[in-house]
Image (cartoon, helix red, strand yellow):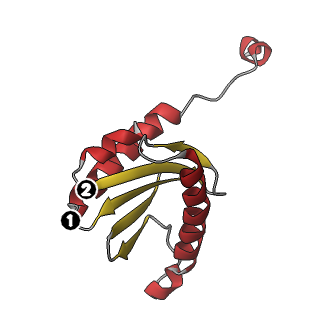
Amino acid sequence: MLDDVLLVPEARHAILLSADGLLRAHSAGITKDEADRQAAALSGVQSISRSTSGFLDTEPTPWRQTLIEFAGGYVFLVAAGPGAYLAVSAGEAVDMEAVSYRMQKLVDRLGRELTAPPRQDAEAGALR
């Protein structure tokens, strides 16, 4: 599923990571070792980003997205559900709106795929 967001021209890599920096999934074009390294780094970026919400001069609000710009491109980092984040790297000529749109669509899809109903104890369910 992560490769879907890479259909935008100039999009390069995608990773899904947990809040504690563990890699949950990665796109085909990045090695597992590099994806692991980026997951650890990006969880730190998210934590730092979240801690700056007071700079808005409002009540603290939930973090949603961080965009990092480099001379050669961008890294997009978005919330992908409780304790999960989606990151995408892209070249400097990327259509940023198209990447953001595809990332949100992927987050919606991931939420449906990864959400499972709570398990019930068979005996407890039978007693009700």
- Residue 110 place in picture, x, y as percent: 44, 39
The mark nearer the N terminus, 1 or 2, is: 2
Q: Position of residue 59 (x, y in %)?
A: 51, 80
Q: Amino acid at mark 1?
A: Ala
- The residue pinned by badge 2 equals 10
Task: Say the numbered circle drawn on residue 26.
Answer: none
User: Dot 2 surroundings within 10 Å: few (below 14), some, or many (20 or more)?
Assistant: some
Q: Measuring 40% from the left and 36% from the top, which residue is drawn there?
A: 1
Q: Residue at x 44, y 85 (%)?
A: 56
Front residue of this view, candidates 13 and 113: 13
Q: Which residue is mark 1?
A: 93
- State which quadrant residue 97 falls in: bottom left
From this viewpoint, is residue 81 visible? no
How many residues crowd around disc 1 within 10 Å: few (fewer than 14), some, or many (20 or more)? few
Q: Is residue 10 visible?
A: yes
Measure the alpha-carbon separation of dots 1 and 2.
7 Å
**What element does badge 1 sit on?**
loop
Amino acid of disc 2: Glu
101 left or right, relative to 23: left
Task: Say if mark 1 contacts mark 2, CB within 8 Å.
Answer: yes
Residue 9 drawn at (x, y percent): 21, 52
Q: Position of residue 5 (x, y in %)?
A: 32, 46
In the image, residue 19 above or below residue 112: below
Check the image and report above or below for 18 versus 4: below
Relative side of 28 to 126, left or right: left
Q: Is residue 104 above or below residue 114?
A: below
Residue beneath the point at 59% across and 48% down = 23
Question: Dot 2 lies on which element?
Answer: loop
